[in-house]
């Protein structure tokens, strides 16, 4: 089988992988790097549960060929918490505001919110809704997710941190 | 997804050669948001996938004052964030504002949106109304095709198998122009249009007469169309007359032939044309008034 | 954030009950550490894949698996011809691998196990099946007609031998007493659960012949029983089955039955001698997971001039699809609102379930109640209008009250319907906004649901085992299931409250049939009530043991002792106190020492419905009202929700934040059901098996929700709580339909209310 060699920054580390050409970024992250926080909810770009940041921009890892990230940086939910497992303010807010039910959508939601706040540190509730429209959740009805994201910008936490 | 060989050429020439050498067995990939899904579904099974991401010069938005040139690899997100497009070609900003999600827009390109040939493509209606010209590169060199002549049927275009879209060229709009694109969807976000109405209007200023109207409709027919009869009717009429726009809506309905599918009926699509054409016009005119107020 | 209306008795002093405590597993989930079935991987694990039917109805002439078998990496290819017959479903009418014929597009024809998912997929493509198409039937009415193609040839009719009928009072009298009668038809489409995590399971046989199935099921113990039946078919009678829950990526009723794919996975694991995992793709999840059933209803209701209802009559036809899962039993729940929403003395209800070549139906949040309530509550508005009484007032006239016994025999204990109606009136500014028909409108939909379990099975019980260690850390082993709704947290709060410890000191272990005691499953909004009571009583027993043994240590009378904030102390003299952990160690570390372990099995004191379908099948009933304000675009028919309010009588909110989570999540599902969700099929084939075409609400579609939590303190509920898992979507459709009527004067009697239906009517 034809393999591509891919070197990139993954959650802060320089890494290399050799995978078949048709591997998606999602497959590579889950299978080669065991980053199981990257969830596949649809595989077609329609649900956002596979959202990761590539060069700080949110993308659907299920739609991206792994080869695309050669020379780029990739951040997943596993790369969000700081030293000694200190949670990102967004992760804390999701816990505190009850934005998590079954949790399947949660990693993608948080990555999407991360990208949103990096570009717009003080979004309105509507800006949050439109900015995160690509992430579906069947459990929460979204209200508490908006609350959580809003609390992070209102709280003036270090939401732009690392970006 | 079936296995393939991935190529990432560094020049458009290399890309054309690769494409030419492999013929029907090769496929170009831009953002991949259409192609990867087709490959996953087995609807497309290329043996060679040629990425355009490392080709220099085709991912910029350039404005000279006379024309706007958008590289085919420009993402929808970049269009969304371009000030010049929002200020001068606002219907194109409308088209990408609610195209897919942020994640999709970060990947998906305008070139892919056009070349994919989907009747629902959001940028196509606006580009039709802008009289955009598509600049291709092939083994024989450059070729330009007006977008109004590009679509032959769902998924069928004038593009040859060994051609690559390089740029989209749009002439500057005359003074007194305004525009709007309305995408009518069932769900607010993450939805394909049930109907798209794109419109560029040119006012004569003083008399408030509509000098020129260019109307692009998507999903109003098997391929995106220009509503030429409606355009003819509107030209020379008072810009701000609701009766005139209601009549324009009727004419547009008559010159469209939308499909009934499981997504909606032909009758409902017509209803939307009738209801939204006047609204699109008045929203465009409101933009004009705002511009004039700002001076 | 919710407004909480407390009972007039005032709120007792609680330590943890009522607090907004974050869900216990949220910390794991925000870090992407929760392991769903998709994430499970064990050494030597194989991947399973199913070959689905290509026809809605066809005879299987031949299955040739030879090409698939030769593919390197393929370990087993199974069909109905090389495996023992196993049938599943409520009527055991669903062979897990189809032999002789297929009855719908989603039928399982063959399956493979292979070294990788890609090989399994390739292998499935290499299986050749020869079909002989048969005439098919997709309309239940046509399927009932003489000479219609028989879906099951061993049965003499497509009508299921499951006649649902309820008669209460005297219908002739009910009709003759009525001054006004309205008779209408309503129709409700197929909709589906759309769990973000698709279905799947992993099966593994052990050296001793025992089986472990890892699964996100909602019914570990019923699944254990069903899988046990399959073991018999494999000649493994007497062997043990263990069912272990993975993290559940949403359930909503979809995982309330056992399905062919699970048995197929077990078969594949058996024949390969290796662990096998089978997970649905999103497309499979859409077409192969049974859905909420399609219902056509005729309904009539009558009332006197003063608005008092005199009768309600409902006849329904349910499209059962080709096989029978729980969908066919939803009339047992539809009866509840039909007989007991408002005081209606005379009731007639009849439902037929009919086999067709469509997809089949299972449980889905609300279990028939959303369909029945849409018809009832839409029609109540029409009736009120005919009588000339404001619809909210009309409901007040007929409102249910505490202490009432309904015609079906339900003993209504706590009942806050009146308070719910009043709160919605105020929240929507009803009196000012109602009745203008100016493009904006308000509407409401009331509901009743079981709130204290539901005896639809021989046992409605749940077991709990509690142990305390030497550091006063509490482990609660509960039969309950957490699908994201927060059962883990609620149980921890109840136990912490009763034992006087912090929630942080409590660990809740669930999801392993080898480790806890039986529970019937996470359905019928029963977990907080039934598992909560079970945990409460187990904690009470543990506390009794502690106080019994602590009394001599503290030299105090047991009756005088209590536990609070981790200390055992004397109520009469708080100076006398000892850390709970020290008490526990003192009891343990001595000759003949002991540790505290307590267990309780709680089965609510309810009745199975009798032959006439009467009886008190729940200990408590939950009432609520949904209210909506909408704006309708006259030209396009687009409906915008301006305000959405749910007032719910929850008995007691053990955790206000989790209650809100249920209300908001339910509202999102309910609004989707009302306005855009529909599984569309053409000749039995699903046309929209993806999230682009099957539309659930996205962020911008979802309005903020006003939650009004009404606490009526149910006498049987744990700390007064009642179940509320399903009600948050039950009243949505009528509330929205009624608001649309108020805005436009147009009555839409079929769901979803897409804009086409609003403008098409204008054309006519
Ligand atoms: C979840 C989701 C939502 C979506 N929503 C919308 C929507 O609302 N509106 C909408 O219009 N679209 C939507 N799309 C479709 C898609 O995102 C767009 O069509 C996008 O613009 C395609 O661009 P791409 O770069 O990803 O194309 P690719 O998938 O890379 O390519 C598409 C096709 O065009 C060809 N191609 C690409 N670039 C060139 C080039 N330069 N020269 C010649 N051929 C080329 C490719 O060979 C391929 O056949 C959605 C897609 C997804 C997954
Ligand atoms: S899995 Fe990638 S968007 Fe759904
Ligand atoms: S929490 Fe279950 S899908 Fe969002």
Image (spheres, coloured by chain):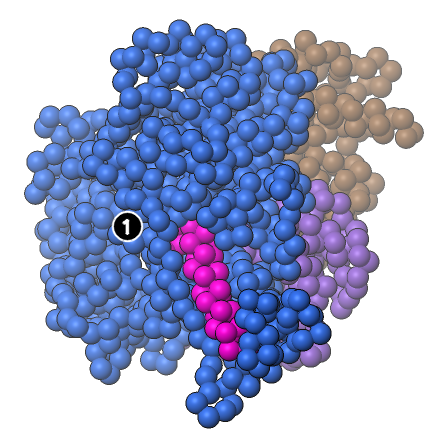
Residue A75 left/right relative to C88 = right
Quarter of the view holding residue C500: bottom right
For the colour brown, the matching chain is: B
Q: Secondary structure at mark 1?
A: loop
Q: Which chain does tag 1 point to?
A: C
For the colour blue, the matching chain is: C
The outermost residue toward the right is: B295
Residue plotted at (38% across, 58% down): C602
Which residue was labeled with disc 1? C457
Q: Position of residue C512 (x, y in %)?
A: 38, 69
Q: Position of residue A84 (x, y in %)?
A: 69, 79
The residues colored magenta run: C521-550
* Near-viewer residue (B25 or C451): C451
Residue plotted at (63% across, 13% down): C436
Label 1: how many Cα within 10 Å (few below 14, some 14–19, many 20+): few
Whether residue B187 is visible to the viewer of this picture, yes or no, is: no
Task: State the hue of chain A.
Answer: purple
Quadrant location of the C terminus of chain A in the rendered image: bottom right
Residue B213 left/right relative to C682 = right
Q: Position of residue B64 (x, y in %)?
A: 81, 44
Q: Residue B70 magenta-drawn?
A: no
Residue B246 left/right relative to C308 = right
């Amino acid at each position: 089988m034809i393999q591509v060699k891919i070197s990139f920054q993954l959650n802060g580390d320089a890494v290399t992988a050799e995978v078949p050409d048709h591997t998606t970024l999602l497959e590579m992250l889950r299978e080669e790097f065991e980053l199981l926080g990257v969830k596949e909810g649809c595989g077609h770009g329609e649900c956002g549960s596979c959202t990761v940041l590539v060069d700080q921009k949110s993308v659907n890892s299920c739609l991206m060929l792994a080869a695309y990230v050669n020379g780029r940086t990739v951040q997943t939910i596993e790369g969000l918490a700081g030293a000694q497992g200190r949670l990102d303010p967004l992760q804390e807010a999701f816990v505190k505001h009850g934005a998590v039910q079954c949790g399947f959508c949660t990693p993608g939601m948080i990555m999407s919110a991360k990208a949103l706040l990096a570009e717009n540190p003080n979004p309105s509730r509507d800006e949050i809704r439109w900015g995160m429209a690509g992430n579906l959740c069947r459990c929460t009805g979204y209200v508490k997710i908006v609350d959580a994201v809003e609390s992070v910008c209102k709280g003036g936490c270090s939401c732009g941190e690392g970006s | 997804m079936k296995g393939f060989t991935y190529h990432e050429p560094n020049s458009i020439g290399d890309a054309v050669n690769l494409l030419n050498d492999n013929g029907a067995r090769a496929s170009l990939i831009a953002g991949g948001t259409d192609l990867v899904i087709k490959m996953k579904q087995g609807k497309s099974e290329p043996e060679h996938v040629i990425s355009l991401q490392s080709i220099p010069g085709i991912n910029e938005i350039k404005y000279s004052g006379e024309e706007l040139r958008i590289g085919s690899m420009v993402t929808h997100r970049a269009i969304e964030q371009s000030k010049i497009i929002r200020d001068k070609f606002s219907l194109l900003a409308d088209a990408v504002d609610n195209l897919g999600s942020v994640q999709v827009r970060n990947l998906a390109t305008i070139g892919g949106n056009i070349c994919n040939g989907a009747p629902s493509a959001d940028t196509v209606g606006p580009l039709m109304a802008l009289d955009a010209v598509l600049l291709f590169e092939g083994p024989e060199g450059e070729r330009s095709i007006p977008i109004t002549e590009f679509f032959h049927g769902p998924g069928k275009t004038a593009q040859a198998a060994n051609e690559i879209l390089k740029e989209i060229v749009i002439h500057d709009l005359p003074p007194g122009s305004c525009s709007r694109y309305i995408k009518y969807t069932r769900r607010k976000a993450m939805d394909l249009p049930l109907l798209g109405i794109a419109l560029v209007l040119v006012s004569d200023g003083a008399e408030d007469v509509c000098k020129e109207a260019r109307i692009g409709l998507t999903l109003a027919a098997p391929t995106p169309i220009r509503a030429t009869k409606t355009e003819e009717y509107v030209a020379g009429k008072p810009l701000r007359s609701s009766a005139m726009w209601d009549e324009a809506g009727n004419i547009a309905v008559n010159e469209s032939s939308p499909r009934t599918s499981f997504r909606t009926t032909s009758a409902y699509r017509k209803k939307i044309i009738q209801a939204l054409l006047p609204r699109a016009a008045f929203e465009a005119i409101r933009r004009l008034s705002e511009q004039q107020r700002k001076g | 954030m919710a407004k909480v209306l407390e009972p007039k008795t005032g709120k007792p002093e609680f330590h943890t009950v009522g607090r907004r405590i974050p869900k216990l597993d949220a910390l794991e989930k925000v870090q992407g550490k929760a392991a769903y079935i998709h994430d499970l991987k064990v050494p030597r694990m194989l991947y399973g894949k199913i070959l689905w039917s290509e026809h809605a109805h066809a005879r299987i002439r031949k299955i040739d698996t030879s090409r698939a078998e030769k593919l390197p990496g393929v370990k087993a290819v199974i069909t109905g011809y090389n495996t023992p017959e196993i049938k599943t479903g409520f009527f055991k009418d669903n062979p897990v691998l189809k032999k002789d014929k297929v009855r719908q597009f989603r039928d399982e024809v063959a399956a493979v196990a292979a070294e990788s998912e890609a090989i399994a997929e390739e292998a499935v493509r290499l299986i050749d099946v020869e079909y002989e198409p048969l005439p098919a039937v997709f309309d239940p009415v046509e399927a009932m007609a003489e000479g219609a193609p028989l879906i099951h040839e061993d049965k003499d009719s497509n009508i299921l031998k499951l006649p649902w009928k309820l008669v209460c009072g005297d219908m002739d009298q009910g009709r003759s007493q009525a001054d006004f009668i309205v008779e209408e038809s309503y129709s409700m489409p197929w909709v589906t659960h759309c769990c973000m995590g698709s279905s799947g399971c992993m099966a593994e046989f052990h050296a001793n012949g025992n089986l472990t199935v890892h699964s996100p099921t909602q019914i570990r113990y019923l699944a254990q029983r069903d899988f046990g039946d399959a073991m018999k078919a494999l000649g493994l009678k007497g062997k043990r089955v263990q069912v272990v829950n993975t993290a559940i990526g949403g359930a909503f009723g979809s995982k309330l039955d056992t399905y062919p794919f699970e048995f197929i996975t077990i078969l594949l694991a058996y024949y390969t001698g290796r662990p096998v995992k089978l997970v649905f793709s999103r497309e499979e999840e859409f077409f192969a997971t049974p859905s909420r059933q399609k219902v056509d209803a005729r309904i009539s209701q009558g009332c006197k001039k003063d608005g008092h209802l005199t009768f309600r009559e409902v006849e329904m036809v349910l499209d059962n699809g080709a096989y029978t899962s729980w969908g066919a039993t939803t009339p047992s729940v539809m009866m509840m609102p039909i007989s007991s929403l408002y005081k209606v003395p005379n009731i007639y209800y009849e439902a037929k379930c009919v086999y067709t070549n469509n997809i089949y139906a299972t449980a889905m949040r609300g279990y028939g109640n959303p369909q029945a309530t849409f018809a009832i509550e839409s029609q109540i508005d029409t009736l009120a209008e005919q009588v000339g009484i404001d619809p909210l007032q009309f409901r007040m006239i007929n409102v249910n009250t505490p202490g009432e016994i309904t015609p079906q025999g339900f003993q209504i204990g706590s009942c806050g319907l009146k308070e719910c109606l009043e709160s919605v009136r105020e929240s929507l500014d009803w009196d000012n906004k109602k009745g203008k028909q100016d493009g904006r409108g308000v509407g409401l939909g009331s509901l009743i649901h079981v709130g204290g379990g539901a005896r639809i099975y021989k046992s409605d019980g749940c077991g709990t085992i509690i142990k305390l260690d030497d550091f006063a850390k509490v482990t609660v082993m509960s039969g309950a299931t957490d699908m994201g709704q927060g059962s883990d947290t609620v149980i921890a709060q109840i136990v912490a409250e009763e034992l006087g410890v912090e929630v942080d000191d409590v660990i809740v272990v669930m999801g392993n049939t080898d480790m806890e005691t039986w529970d019937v499953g996470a359905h019928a909004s029963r977990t907080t009530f039934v598992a909560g009571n079970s945990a409460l009583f187990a904690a009470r027993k543990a506390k009794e043991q502690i106080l019994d043994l602590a009394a001599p240590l503290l030299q105090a009378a047991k009756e005088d002792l209590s536990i609070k904030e981790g200390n055992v102390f004397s109520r009469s003299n708080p100076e006398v106190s000892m850390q709970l952990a020290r008490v526990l160690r003192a009891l343990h570390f001595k000759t003949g020492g002991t540790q505290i372990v307590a267990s309780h099995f709680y089965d609510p004191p309810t009745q199975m419905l009798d032959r006439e379908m009467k009886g008190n099948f729940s200990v408590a009933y939950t009432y609520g009202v949904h209210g909506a304000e909408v704006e309708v675009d006259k030209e396009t028919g687009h409906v915008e929700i301006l305000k959405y309010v749910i007032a719910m009588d929850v008995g007691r909110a053990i955790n206000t934040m989790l209650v809100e989570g249920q209300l908001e999540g339910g509202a999102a599902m309910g609004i989707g059901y009302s306005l855009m969700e529909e599984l569309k099929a053409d000749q039995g084939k699903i046309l929209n098996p993806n999230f682009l075409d099957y539309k659930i609400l996205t962020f911008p579609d979802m309005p903020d929700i006003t939650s009004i939590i009404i606490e009526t303190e149910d006498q049987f509920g744990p700390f007064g709580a009642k179940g509320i898992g399903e009600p948050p979507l039950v009243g949505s459709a009528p509330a929205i339909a009624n608001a649309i009527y108020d805005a436009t004067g147009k009555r839409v009697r079929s769901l979803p209310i897409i804009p086409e239906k609003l403008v098409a009517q204008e054309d006519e």
